[in-house]
């Protein structure tokens, strides 16, 4: 019995010594490092914010009065960015339609035809031709180059022409041009940007 107690006491002492040695193994000097301050800023922006302007320096409304077949009118829409970041730019042109006869074919036609993409810097993203007189055909183009903060595009077209209709209805309407922009960050291509905006 005495021998067993001695063995138990020795075992307890050894176990205690082991715990102490383990505690000692985790004791160490502690230290800290210096602090690196990495300053950054985020550009101002807001989803849906108007951050661009469409300019038409050559447009003169007087030129578009009482137009006849074959008449050409200067109209040169381009977008100027007011954003503080690089963007992809898209312009949508809405052209009114009417009942007319062109090349011997009576039907619904666009009232005028813009000379889209004369400089080769725009890509047609989507064409939606109307087949109902009085509703607009829609043409959406994307600018092939990224537009810098405060930058601008070239003109999407420089003029529009009244086709050589042999019979038309009288019409008084407008060509509407609207734009959309999206940051280039996260959208490496024009196609990816168009898809993100639901334009394709």
Image (cartoon, rainbow, N blue to C red):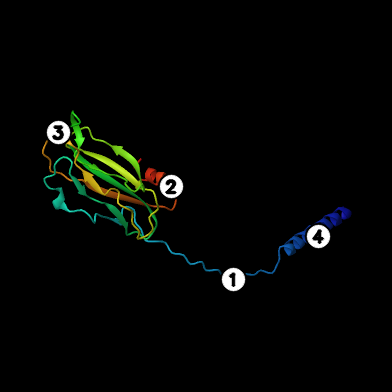
Query: Could you tell me how far apart the alpha carbons at marks 4 and 1 are, in whole angstroms?
Result: 44 Å
- Residue drawn at point x = 78 percent, y = 59 percent: 18
Is residue 198 shown to the viewer in this render? no
Q: For marks 4 and 1, give the one nearer the viewer.
A: 1
Q: Position of residue 103 (x, y in %)?
A: 20, 31
Are circles 1 and 3 on residues that touch, CB within 8 Å? no
For marks 3 and 2, the one nearer the N-term is 3
Mark 3, residue position? 166
Q: Earlier in the sequence, mark 4 or mark 1?
A: 4
Q: Nearer the viewer, mark 1 or mark 2?
A: 2
For marks 2 and 4, give the CA distance. 73 Å
**Dot placed on the residue nearer the N-terminal end, 1 or 3:** 1
Residue annotated with mark 4: 13
Is disc 1 in contact with disc 2, using a CB cutoff of under 8 Å? no
Q: Is residue 99 above or below residue 60?
A: above
Q: Nearer the viewer, mark 4 or mark 3?
A: 3
Q: Residues within 10 Å of mark 3 (few under 14, many from 20)?
A: few
Circle 3 sits in a helix, a strand or a loop, which is it? strand
Read off the residue under disc 1: 34
Give coordinates of residue 121: x percent, y percent.
36, 48
Q: CA distance from mark 1 to mark 2?
A: 42 Å
Front in this rendered view, residue 163 or 175: 163
Q: Identify the residue at horizontal 30%, vertical 38% (top origin).
A: 127
Label 1's element? loop
Q: Nearer the viewer, mark 3 or mark 2?
A: 3
Sequence-wise, the earlier of marks 2 and 4 is: 4
Residue 152 percent across, percent down from the top left:
33, 56
Assign a secondary structure to mark 2: loop
Q: Label 2, on which residue? A: 189
């Amino acid at each position: 019995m005495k021998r067993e107690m001695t063995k138990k006491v020795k075992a307890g002492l050894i176990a205690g010594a082991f715990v102490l040695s383990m505690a000692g193994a985790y004791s160490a000097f502690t230290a800290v490092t210096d602090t690196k301050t990495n300053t950054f800023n985020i550009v101002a922006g807001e989803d849906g914010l108007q951050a661009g302007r469409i300019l038409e320096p050559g447009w003169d409304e007087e030129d578009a009065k009482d137009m006849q077949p074959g008449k050409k009118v200067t109209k040169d829409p381009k977008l100027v960015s007011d954003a503080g970041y690089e963007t992809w730019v898209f312009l949508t042109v809405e052209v009114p339609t009417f009942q007319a006869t062109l090349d011997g074919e009576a039907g619904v036609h666009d009232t005028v035809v813009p000379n889209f993409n004369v400089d080769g810097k725009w890509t047609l993203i989507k064409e939606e031709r109307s087949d109902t007189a009085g509703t607009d055909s829609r043409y959406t183009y994307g600018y092939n180059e990224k537009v810098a903060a405060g930058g601008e595009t070239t003109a999407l077209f420089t003029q529009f022409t009244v086709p050589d209709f042999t019979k038309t209805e009288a019409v008084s309407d407008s060509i509407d041009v609207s734009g959309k922009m999206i940051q280039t960050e996260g959208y490496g291509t024009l196609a990816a940007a168009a898809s993100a905006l639901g334009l394709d």
